[in-house]
Image (cartoon, grey):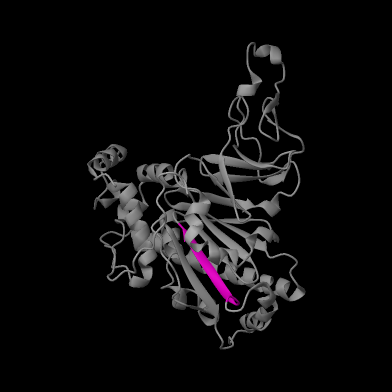
Amino acid sequence: MSPNTPSPRLVPEPTQTGTSLPLWTYASEELLELEYQEFFLKSWQLVGHVCDLPSPGDFLTFDLWRDSVIVLRGKDRVLRAFSNICRHRASRLLDGRGNCGGAIQCAYHGWSFRNDGTLSGIPKPENFPGVDKSELGLLEVRMEIYRGHIFVNLSEEGPRVREMMGPIDDQVAVYAPEGYEPMDDPVAEIWECNWKLAWDNYQENYHIPIGHPSLHRLLVETGEGLTLDNGINTGIFVLRDKPSSVARERRYQELMPSTDHRYPEGKRRRWLQISMNPNMGIEYYPDMFSMMQILPLGTARTQIKMIHHSPPNPSAEEREMQAIEVALLDEVNAQDKILVERIQRGVQSSGYKPGPLALEESGIHDFHNLVRERLPVTRLPEAPMRGSLAQENARLKSQAPTKR
């Protein structure tokens, strides 16, 4: 544990309904700027797995609104993360994923950087008298590998991923994610909604019986989930014994025993769902891993990114399961897209006031309280005068009692 970092603690189960953020918070461009600074630039973001970068020169990029990060395996086989900009004129260096060989060359003026981030060459160096190349390497970004998963953080603030995951590390360890293999390329799609609405939707299961009949037929929540005060919530689901009335889902149930050899007795046929504020859902299934990441592009435009990985050496039966699982996830995402975009249209309606949050929506309540804590301007029932939101937030923050 880092010095002065408190250990994550359990949050008591809610005993009463909560209240939602005011509607203006889903439409304010000024607020989105503060959210980006307070939440996204200061949070850990999962960008991939070590299995995605097996060879020197392998890279992947991660785009976070205005920022972009390169994760790159060096000639020394060490993984490093850098800001995806040339040190000369800030041109983006790489896109997507691939292998850059021994160096990255900027497409604008040809500056080149070794895959350890150091500057190796400047065309026409006589144009830069007195420049010290050792001071112009790529800007390193905070990175951590947790059980094979690669996380990056654009700030120097906050605890490490391992510290945050400490209370649930034994649950994650059951799935042995260090040994995962590549499964398919990341998938991204655009939802026409505010990012908070998409994240609200992920954090509650109250809508599953109506919104996701396939999940409702297949799974039941056990009630073993945890809520931590560091923004991590978990849920445990098990496969229903009753065969599904849908052939594809019934086949998935029939294939499930093929995964039993991977897990100890009592831990088989279980799904671990982890939500990490402000925007990531990490899910360990018996047959595969899935991550859903919610990335703002504007007040009413959000990128939804999905990453999948596979346990090592899957059998033919497990491959068949994975194909069914991915199809089910695609179906669920398509349903959620429709549901959340309908909410986006609804929150713009005149005269609407948010209803109470159910006890089963406690994850939303906790998240909204976190928003109110970090951005106290969101406690106001109406938006501040245009152009004054940041100043008003700073004023309210200065009045807040100091935490001990």
Q: Main secondary structure of the magenta part?
A: strand
Residue at 70%, 11% (x, y): give it. Answer: 126
Q: Which image quarter: residue 318?
A: bottom right
Say left or right for 351 vs 359. left
Say left or right for 249 vs 196. right
**Front residue (pair 84, 192):** 84
Image x and y of residue 11, in percent: 36, 63
Q: Which image quarter: residue 324?
A: bottom right
Q: Which image quarter: residue 135?
A: top right
Image x and y of residue 178, in percent: 65, 58
Vertical arrangement, residue 143 with respect to residue 345, above or below: above
**Front residue (pair 168, 205):** 168
Q: Is residue 18 magenta?
A: no
- Can residue 343 be seen by looking at this rendering? yes
Image x and y of residue 262, in percent: 67, 72
Residue at 29%, 65% (x, y): give it. Answer: 18
Residue at 29%, 56% (x, y): give it. Answer: 22
Q: Which residues are magenta?
A: 267-276
Image x and y of residue 36, in percent: 43, 44
- Can residue 194 be seen by looking at this rendering? no
Residue at 45%, 67% (x, y): give it. Answer: 339
**Front residue (pair 344, 128):** 128
Say left or right for 206 vs 177. left
Say left or right for 38 vs 161. left
Vertical arrangement, residue 180 with respect to residue 75, above or below: below
- Count of all numbered marks drawn on residues in the image: 0
Vertical arrangement, residue 204 with respect to residue 344, above or below: below
